[in-house]
Image (cartoon, grey):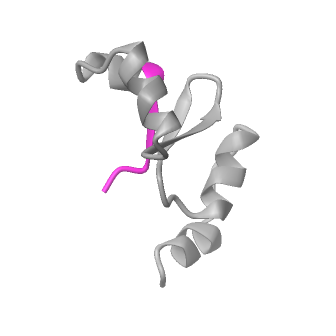
């Protein structure tokens, strides 16, 4: 299951900017940083990595997946 989308991804899937704002307000999406959104419930270590423009290491990603 995908956890992160750019604004462009969401717009290309037929979502409007208003739809995106509403999803954030309702807690269905998290505004990670400008132009990047995450699914509600995305693991905190993955959000921290994305907020600084990084990527999760294999250890962080494995932990987020419950391995």
- Side (left or right) of 52 relative to 39: right
Residue 61 placement: quadrant: bottom right
Residue reaching furthest to the bottom: 67
For image coordinates 69% across by 51% down, the residue present is 49
Q: Nearer the viewer, residue 63 or 47?
A: 47
Quick check: is 5 in the magenta stretch? yes
Q: Nearer the viewer, residue 24 or 50?
A: 24
9 to 39, vertically: above or below: above
Which residue appears at 53% of the width and 75% of the height? 62
Point out residue 34 in the picture as x, y percentages from the top left corner.
Answer: 64, 23
Taking the image as shown, residue 2 lies to the left or right of residue 40, namely left
Observer-nearest of 64 and 28 = 28
Q: Position of residue 55 (x, y in %)?
A: 63, 49
- Viewer-side residue, 63 vs 20: 20
- Residue for point 67% across, 63% down: 45
Magenta stretch?
A: 1-7
Determine whether 53 is above or below 46 in the image. Answer: above
The outermost residue toward the left is 14
Above/below status of 64 relative to 7: below
Residue 54 figure quarter: top right
Q: Is residue 10 left or right of residue 57?
A: left
Q: Quadrant of the N terminus?
A: bottom left
Total tally of numbered discs in the picture: 0
Judge whether residue 57 is colored magenta. Answer: no
Residue at image coords 41%, 16%: 18
């Amino acid at each position: 299951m995908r956890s992160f989308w750019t604004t462009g991804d969401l717009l290309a899937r037929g979502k409007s900017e208003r739809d995106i704002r509403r999803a954030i307000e309702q807690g269905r999406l998290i505004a990670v940083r400008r132009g990047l959104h995450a699914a509600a419930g995305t693991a905190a270590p993955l959000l921290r990595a994305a907020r600084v423009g990084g990527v999760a290491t294999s250890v962080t990603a494995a932990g987020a997946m419950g391995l």
